[in-house]
Image (cartoon, rainbow, N blue to C red):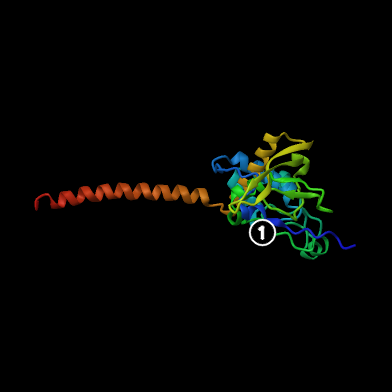
Amino acid sequence: MKTLIIVIGLLLPALGWSAGGNTYPDDEIVIDWDDKLSMQRGARTFVNYCMSCHSAAYSRFNRVGQDLGISDEMVLENLIFTTDINGHKTKVGELMKTTMTDEYAEQAFGTVPPDLSLIARSRGVKWLYNYLRGFYVDESRAGLGMNNGVFDNVGMPHVLVELQGYQIPKMKTRKDSNGDAHEVIVGFEIIKPGTMTRSEYDQTVYDLVAFLDYLGEPYKQTRKNVGTGVIIFLLAFLILTYLLKKEYWKDIH
């Protein structure tokens, strides 16, 4: 029997409930770019749970360490678990690539898992945060056994299930704009706890999304700081220019 084809859902168009406005969860999220500890924890989660399949090939390990306040020694010890074709540990200056080859991915999953360097810019942090918290048990889906409240008929396995645990949806009947009744998810119930409480898991997902947000635009905070400085300079220059104009024109008026 052909190996189960795992269609990676992160880069495919959101269908189903997403299109109908019935996604759950649908919580807002604001990333604090000053919280480097959160991004450090997110980097740890990323390399432990995501990089076995996904790359972040637009970033280098040492650049991530530099931006997040992690020394090269700590990066080597805690963030790099890959090796080259000769079995030597990946160097700290290398790109963040998975060791899985495209050929193996095609044979095992039927598709190549997408690079996640720009996923936060593509999907948005809110979508990612809710998507990673929205997996639930769906026995009707043979093989995968999981679905997602944000991405119906998701193809990606729930790689964080050992942390979150197994949950089932709480359903409620609601009518759409046409008056048709639909069963929609209004909550989740944990049936098999993971190693984390709900709040701990939510924080872990937040940290992971914060790291992905950083990967998508490493210069974001610098750009904002520079922009603020430029605006302050222009305002100050405007005041000086106005005072100079008054000085030049005082004798005419």
Answer above or below: position of 165 versus 147. Answer: above
Residue 73 in sight here: no
Residue 103: name its quadrant.
Answer: bottom right
Q: How crowded is mark 1: few (under 14 residues within 10 Å), some or many (20 or more)?
A: some
Q: Nearer the viewer, residue 7 or 48?
A: 7
Answer above or below: position of 116 versus 126. Answer: below
Residue 156 in sight here: yes
Q: Nearer the viewer, residue 23 or 29?
A: 23
Where is residue 116 drawn, in percent x and y? 66, 55
At label 1, which amino acid type do we have?
Leu
Secondary structure category for the residue under label 1: helix
Where is residue 81 drawn, in percent x and y? 76, 49
Residue extending farthest right: 1
Left or right of 183 in this view: 218? left
Where is residue 20 drawn, in percent x and y? 62, 53
Left or right of 73 in this view: 145? right
Q: Which of 158 and 40 is in front in this view?
A: 158
Residue occupying the point 73% across, 57% down: 8
Residue occupying the point 66% across, 49% down: 181
Q: So how many labels did they put on this image?
A: 1
Residue 154: name its quadrant.
Answer: bottom right
**Disc 1 designates what residue?**
11
Where is residue 37 drawn, in percent x and y? 61, 39
